[in-house]
Amino acid sequence: MTLPVPVRFSPSVEEIQPDEEKTIAELNETFDTILETTAKDYGHAVRSVHAKAHGIIEGTLRVEDNLPPELAQGLFAKPGEHKVYMRLSTNAGDILPDAISLPRGLALKVLDVEGERLPGAKGTTQDFIMVNGPVFQAKTAEDFHGSLKMLAKTTDRLEGTKTVMSSVLRTVNTALEAVGIESSTIQSMGGAPNVDPLGETYFSVTPFRYGDYIAKFSVVPVSSGLTALTRIEIDASGRENAIRETVQSEMEAIQGVWELRVQLCRDLEKQPVEDPTVEWKEDEAPFRTVATITAAPQDTWAAPKVQAVDEEMRFSIWTGLAAHQPLGNINRARKAPYQHSADFRERFNGCPMHEPSGAPKAGA
């Protein structure tokens, strides 16, 4: 089948909603509820979403040689190598026992990236934030705010209740999947399978500018040590940090290889910019590999690395190149609240955030 040519980027692909600023202000308020509650509980500020990390992986991203013109864009315009950090997490804004199963997250920071920056994007890094599912849970920022308010109401120390709830939701989610239905809402509230994050495929779920074009991103495990873990569930019974311990043990022996893939928009009706609940079907808009990430066996919870990355760095889709501008209502609404969250952490913890270049120094 001959594919349509990729859609060229134009500012007209976005549709700015009249009430976006009001919704963003409400998101900031809800983030404050989560941030203040968890900071009070822990005596230490954590991220308002994806608070709990399961591992920090250092690796190298290599941009492919001889990419065709439509793929040789932005960060991927020329071949080369970049140091990367990968942060594995789950999506709640509080630090929960791993028996409470939630969707997995992957935050990827690529260092020493050349090019025009997005407004306000400090440093020379390019961030990608992904989850292990191809669609977002909400169509609009207003819908996202509704889901976030539900999470905010459960942000406390009632962990026993949440564990029981997660078990019930997992049963419901399994039943839905058995008849071909996936519920991102149930999964986001604690009904996701308790899978090993090292074997998962991650998706940006929202679209981005890709130089002259529009795209979504994906990170896919391809080395045998990683693919052997795909959809493998972790028994977290009685182990509060079972996922972290499992990842730490596994990565001591794994030579990890992932492909970073790009899915170019080829039809704005079938691959909409403003509705991230619509999956871009791969037979209509295939993923293409543009780079490979490799990571040698390592300790994924070494104290200096955790301090440098988990405590002293922030990850944001708005940190990066103008050539990879986030697109759509959801992405526009993520800019101010995520900065708001990082500012809160920095202020409460007295620990400045920074964008790295080269190897970080412990305690820097």
Image (cartoon, grey):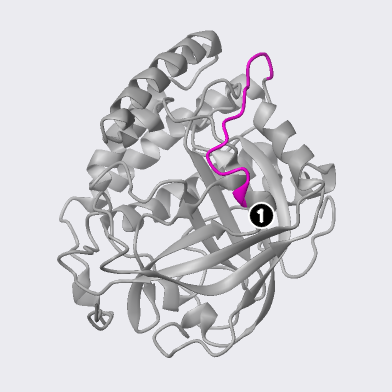
| Residue 346 on image: x %, y % | 63, 45
* Residue 349 seen anywhere in this rendered image of the structure: yes
Left or right of 329 in this view: 203? right
Q: In the image, is residue 47 part of the stretch drawn in magenta?
A: no
| Residue 252 on image: x %, y % | 82, 46
Q: Residues within 10 Å of mark 1 (few under 14, many from 20)?
A: few
At label 1, the amino acid type is: Ser
Name the residue at 35% across, 69% down. Answer: 286
Identify the image quadrant of residue 33. Answer: top left
Q: In the image, is residue 236 part of the stretch drawn in magenta?
A: yes
Left or right of 357 in this view: 104? left
Name the residue at 82% across, 44% down. Answer: 302
Left or right of 298 in this view: 182? left
Q: Main secondary structure of the magenta part?
A: loop
| Residue 184 on image: x %, y % | 33, 36
Q: Secondary structure at mark 1?
A: helix
Relative to the observer, which residue lies in front, 176 or 124? 176
Relative to the observer, which residue lies in front, 59 or 29? 59
| Residue 289 on image: x %, y % | 50, 72
For disc 1, the marked residue is: 224
Name the residue at 84% across, 58% down. Answer: 361
Relative to the observer, which residue lies in front, 254 or 135? 254
Relative to residue 185, is residue 116 depicted above or below? below
Q: Quarter of the image for the N terminus: give it.
A: bottom left
Segment tinted magenta in the rendering: 227-239
* Residue 312 seen anywhere in this rendered image of the structure: no
Q: Quarter of the image for the C terminus: give it.
A: bottom right
Query: What number of labels is visible?
Result: 1
Relative to residue 359, is residue 213 depicted above or below? below
